[in-house]
């Protein structure tokens, strides 16, 4: 069973969730290495990364329901009087900026970050379980090179 570092996997989810680029990331199911694919990067990746069952593509935040749905569930729970206002944010571009401004205004930004972190961890744990990946929370050594497949 491949072992994947939680922070590295969370970073990969962020990377593939950037909407301005056509980014993807893959986990090697043998080594746990994470490969990043983007027209903006020149990282070498295995030739068979998109065709071999040795690799699994990392989904984006939408797959995990970690986007606007999560934000609105937080507002419903913590700031119910602001729900309609927050829901309106997510109908236009720039929603997260306005959402975070609201949280800052209500002094709920730290609480949001905790809520988001717990939801992200739960989603990534389940995804790893479903795909036969062990999730590690150990911090890599500061000078350690990322493991390659």
Image: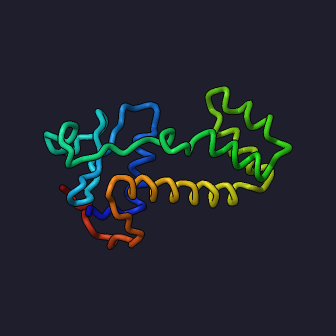
- Residue 123, placed above or below residue 45: below
Quarter containing the C terminus: bottom left
Scheme of image coloration: rainbow
Residue 107 vs residue 130, the one in the foreground: 130
Relative height, residue 137 to residue 24 (above, below): below
Q: How many marks?
A: 0
**149 over 51 or under it: above or below:** below
Instruction: Give percent across and percent down for residue 100.
Output: 68, 45
Quadrant where the N terminus is found in the figure: bottom left
View extreme (top): residue: 92
Residue 120 x %, y %: 53, 54
Residue for point 27% across, 62% down: 2
Instruction: Residue at the far left: name it.
Output: 47
The x and y percentages for residue 31 are 21, 60
Find residue 83 and report its image quarter: top right
* Residue beneath the point at 34% across and 64% down: 134
The reply, left or right, for residue 62 in relation to residue 127 is right
Location of residue 134 with respect to 119 vertically, above or below: below
Task: Residue 101: give x, y in percent of width and height.
Answer: 72, 44
Question: Residue at left 66%, top 44%?
Answer: 71
* Residue 34 falls left or right of residue 20: left
10 horizontally vs 116: left or right: left
């Amino acid at each position: 069973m491949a072992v994947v570092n939680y922070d590295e996997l969370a970073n990969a989810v962020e990377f593939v969730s950037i909407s301005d680029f056509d980014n993807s990331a893959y986990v090697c199911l043998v080594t746990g290495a994470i490969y990043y694919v983007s027209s903006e990067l020149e990282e070498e990746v295995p030739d068979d990364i998109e065709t071999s069952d040795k690799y699994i593509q990392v989904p984006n935040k939408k797959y995990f329901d970690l986007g606007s749905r999560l934000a609105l569930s937080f507002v419903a729970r913590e700031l119910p009087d602001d729900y309609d206002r927050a829901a309106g944010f997510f109908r236009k571009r720039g929603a997260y900026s306005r959402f975070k401004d609201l949280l800052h205004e209500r002094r709920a930004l730290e609480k949001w970050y905790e809520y988001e972190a717990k939801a992200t961890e739960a989603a990534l744990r389940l995804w790893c379980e479903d795909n036969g990946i062990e999730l590690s929370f150990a911090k890599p050594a500061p000078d350690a090179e990322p493991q390659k497949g």
